[in-house]
Image: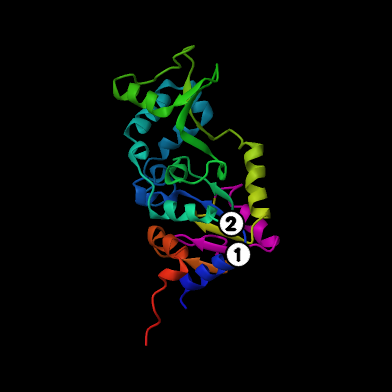
Amino acid sequence: MDEVGHARELLRQAERVAVLTGAGISTASGIGDFRGPQGRWTLDPDAEKVSTLSWYLNDPQVRIKAWRFRAESPVYDARPNAAHVALVGLEHGAKLTGLITQNTDGLHQLAGSNAELVIELHGNSRTWRCETCRATGPMLEMVHRVRSGDADPRCPFDRGIVRATTILFEEGLDGATIDAAVAAVDEADVLLVIGTSLSVHPAAGLVPYGRRRGVELIIVNAESTDYDQLAAHVLRDAIVQVVPELFRPVDDEPPPSD
């Protein structure tokens, strides 16, 4: 049995599984990452300003750049890929304790994952929020305004500054969301990590935390992480191919070769 087969068997034997996903699971859907070799922050370090609260609120040019990024973003046309879809199957038989994600693209929900089980550590980019009156709405409303020539769209109710409902630099993560992520790992026998370098905390800290509690670890990522040595199985194959393989039904197993 190869490494994928061993990892698949571990998942089959587990009664409860928690999942942690990062940008790598969405690249096959056409959404680039931020920190990789071709990531937006790698190629344009100044772009990090658009995700920094003080810059966003106080510099109109940074907001204009942020809105231009959103208007040109492939997120709103992106569709879930086979890896997103495969994870939906974990909910059958109540096996999934939580789908923890560092992504803000909403593709897990679009794939059919139960929104109550998706734990979005960094928020969701598909909705907007006014900084003053706290009104919200679909982000596509604002994106359409930008595409129609409104470079820095304001709240339709009080003309306040509008932002995505994501966590920006200089902001803390929501405490209840962190608690939900920790609880999902607490309840699991296996933690499946997909498409993250495990370099961003507190998400990365869930891995050693889980191992200290006896949770088995499977990592699926193109590049090495600082926690590979803690994993029972480390898989480097393409995520869009290997994740569906991990959840292939027993009936679909190929016959043994002679």
Name the image colouring.
Answer: rainbow
Q: Amino acid at mark 1?
A: Ala
Q: Are marks 1 and 2 in contact (CB under 8 Å)?
A: yes
Report helix, strand or loop for mark 2.
loop
User: For the view shown, which residue lies furthest in the left direction?
Assistant: 148
Q: Residue at x 53, y 68 (%)?
A: 233
Q: Where is mark 2, residue-wise?
A: 95
Residue 155 point in image, percent of width and height? 46, 17
Report helix, strand or loop for mark 1.
loop
Picture disc at residue 14: 1
Quarter of the figure with residue 210: bottom right
Quarter of the figure with residue 189: bottom right
Q: Residue at x 50, y 68 (%)?
A: 8
Q: Is residue 222 magenta?
A: yes
| Cα distance in 3D space between marks 1 and 2 | 8 Å
> Total number of numbered labels?
2
Disc 1 crowd, CA 10 A, few/some/many (<14, 14-19, 20+): some
Sequence-first tag of 1 and 2:
1
Please name whichever residue, 148 or 35, is drawn nearer the observer in this view of the structure.
148
57 relative position to 36: left or right: right
84 relative position to 175: left or right: left
Residue 136 point in image, percent of width and height? 50, 23
Q: Is residue 70 above or below residue 7?
A: above
Please name whichever residue, 163 or 49, is drawn nearer the observer in this view of the structure.
163
Q: Is residue 195 above or below residue 160?
A: below
Residue range highlighted in magenta: 200-228
Disc 2 crowd, CA 10 A, few/some/many (<14, 14-19, 20+): some
17 relative position to 60: left or right: right
Residue 258 point in image, percent of width and height? 37, 88
